Image (spheres, rainbow, N blue to C red):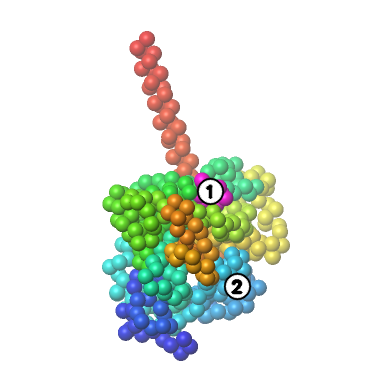
Amino acid sequence: MEGLVLEEKDAGDWAYRGEGACNLVLAYTGSSPSFMGKVMRVQKVPRVGSAGRRSPTALSENERVLWKEIDDIVSCPNKEIAAQLYVEHVMSPLLGSKYVDSGMHVLVSREFLESIEKNVLRERPACRVDAAKVDRDCDSALLMSDHSLFPGTLKGVPCISVEIKPKCGFLPCSRFISEGNAVKRIITRFRMHQTLKLHQGEISELSKYNPLDLFSKSKDKIHKAINDLFTTPQNNFRVFLNGSLIFGGLGGGADSTDVVTSEAFEDALKPVIRADSGLCTKNFLQLVSETVYKSGILDQLLEVQKLDNFDIEGAIHAYYDVISESCPVCGELGEEEVSHRYTSLHSIPMDESLKIVKDYLVAATAKDCSLMISFRPRADGDLGSPYNEVHLESTNQTFDYKASFIDLDLKPLKKMGKYYELDKKIVSCYTKMVETEQEADEATSMEAYTTNKDSI
């Protein structure tokens, strides 16, 4: 595709697939062999504070020091290329090249981006539109395989895909977690963050999903996790049929699955899952659970997540040494606590500080990525497929499946401060919620005691 530039006339061939905080995702709907089976990631910029002169390189001066061992990333001219090189050089070796597609770049004109923004505006969630817009100054976009489909097409054979955001699959045990935040060692980050999101009105109900179940290697717990994700998908669980979304939210998520949604999903599954009426969904969720269990694909993801072995409460101190600034966190903490717990972090060699911060950011990518698993029914007696297979006993069907990790974004160094502040908010909100519930329980118990005493 060297020399090819997508122009305004090409924008109509790209349909809105979804979006995250930093990128729009578009699926190709045209007839060009070069783009069939592809999706495109287009960069966004915040609506507030997005103005300013562009840096001659994608990374800040401190980030170039952080990633100094990878020349390609350090010298690349824009963020989109840096993101692609990060996936290629960092995340692919860690997660396995067969599960990671670093993609390639295609040049785009400003008119193409303007037309794309106009075309997809009505499909974007209002909260996403208010927060960010297409970066029209970008001159390239990232082209990747559409992991909701199998390469090539088999006429009449449906393909169904599930996208899961696993989130953090372990409880931190870092010695740098303060005693006041010890709850982090026993309650998952996901559960505590749900409390903050509910408090802020981002969700209408708490999810029952527990990431520890999904990463447990227990077939029963994995099945429970998949069912819980289906019940409250939010933006953590989506399903596609032949590349089109049939369950879950495009860019904002859906809090819970109601009867109407369940019935529509059940009907959509009928071409794929051979089952009695009302049982397609149950069998599909079993298929997903069985594949997660059998493939063991989450094992390596968990290892990458565990590169964060200092927790943000430790890594934040290394961060301020990396950027050569006085540590404000130490200023917030008591002198005794600082000397007891954090002084050692400010006396280590710079290379060790860089490693702590780099490992934390790589782990942050792994905690925020998505897993895409695609299935297609295998014809009876077909032994020539190059793909792995999984057998669904309840329907006596065998499926080809392929798995991929997506959304492996390079996390900006400057977000370290925000990660620390968010961590404080999450723990504080959860702690207050627990205290409020305890006070309510005590008041109810006292009221019951008083009532019983008066009746005697």
Q: CA distance from mark 1 to mark 2?
A: 33 Å
Q: Nearer the viewer, residue 3 or 28?
A: 28
- At a point 63% along the width and 74% down the height, the residue shown is 70
Q: Residue furthest bottom?
A: 3
Please identify the quadrant where the C terminus is shown: top left
Residue 299 falls left or right of residue 16 = right
Q: Position of residue 340 (x, y in %)?
A: 68, 46
Q: Nearer the viewer, residue 4 or 150?
A: 150
> Quick check: 265 above or below 111?
above
Q: Which mark is drawn over residue 219?
A: 1
Q: Secondary structure at mark 1?
A: helix
Give the number of the mark in front: 1 or 2.
Answer: 1
- At a point 61% along the width and 57% down the height, the residue shown is 303
The kind of residue tagged 2 is His
Task: Using a 10 Å C-alpha cutoff, classify the residue at mark 1 as few (fewer than 14 neighbours), some (14 to 19) or many (20 or more).
Answer: some
Q: Position of residue 423 (x, y in %)?
A: 51, 51
The kind of residue tagged 1 is Lys
Q: Residue furthest top?
A: 456
- At a point 60% along the width and 78% down the height, the residue shown is 72
Boundaries of the magenta span = 212-222
- At a point 65% along the width and 51% down the height, the residue shown is 342
Q: Position of residue 202 (x, y in %)?
A: 37, 52
Q: Position of residue 253 (x, y in %)?
A: 37, 57
Disc 1 or 2, which lies upstream in sequence? 2
Q: Magenta span has 307? A: no
Task: Using a 10 Å C-alpha cutoff, classify the residue at mark 2 as few (fewer than 14 neighbours), some (14 to 19) or many (20 or more).
Answer: some
Q: Give the labeled residue for mark 2.
A: 89
